[in-house]
Amino acid sequence: MIEILVVLVLLGLLASLAIVNLGGGEQRELNSKVRELYVLMQTAAEQAILNNEELGLVVDEQGYRFLVYDELEQTWRSESERLFQGRNFPEWMSVTLFSEDDIPRLARGNDEEDEEGSLRPDIVFYSSAETTPFELEFLATTSPDYRFRLEADGLDDIKMHTPSDTDDF
């Protein structure tokens, strides 16, 4: 009888561990998506300096994509490098862009084109090592208290703030 009780206790412990490990899937994916964008933004900033060209980033509620400035045509075009291919956000992820004018706005899919129909980035990585000042806030709509923030003041490196940071958003 004791053996059966011990087996049941062990099964209960294993089941509780499995539930803990399976939970928080959206939070893990949010963490992964934000870290991926953070690394790509750092890489884009470095590529802009190394290649002496301006790179841009368009962000909307579906995802993001990188652009490169064509000096001859004086227009933005989609980046052809595989590393900078466009990526989509999961449906449950909410993204808010705070631009340099400090007015929060939800980046919209049709907003990245100006009046002439040419592409226009929300964030620019300049060959002079500067960046458009911005804040990007990410959260899972099912867990609004679990937030990530990417920010740049225009002169320093891009910073990432995670939910475990002690400062308030």
Image (cartoon, rainbow, N blue to C red):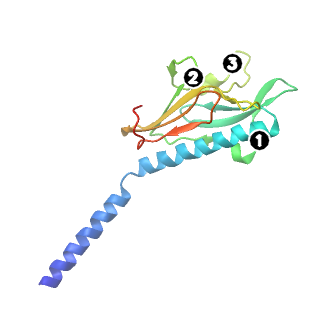
Instruction: Please name the amino acid that badge 3 sits on.
Output: Asp
Left/right of residue 52 with respect to residue 106 in the rendered view: right
Circle 1 residues within 10 Å: few <14, some 14–19, many ≥20:
few
For badge 2, the amino acid type reads Ser
Residue 86: tell me if it is visible.
no
**Element on which disc 3 rests:** loop
Number of the front mark, 2 or 1: 2
Taking the spot 65% from the left edge, 37% from the top edge, the residue there is: 65
Q: Which residue is mark 1?
A: 80
What residue does disc 2 label?
99
Q: Amino acid at mark 1?
A: Ser
Label 2 crowding class (10 Å Cα cut-off): few <14, some 14-19, many 20+? Answer: some
Identify the residue under disc 3.
Answer: 114
Mark positioned earlier in the residue sequence (3 or 1): 1
In the depicted structure, whether residue 19 falls above or below residue 46: below
Left or right position of 35 against 53: left
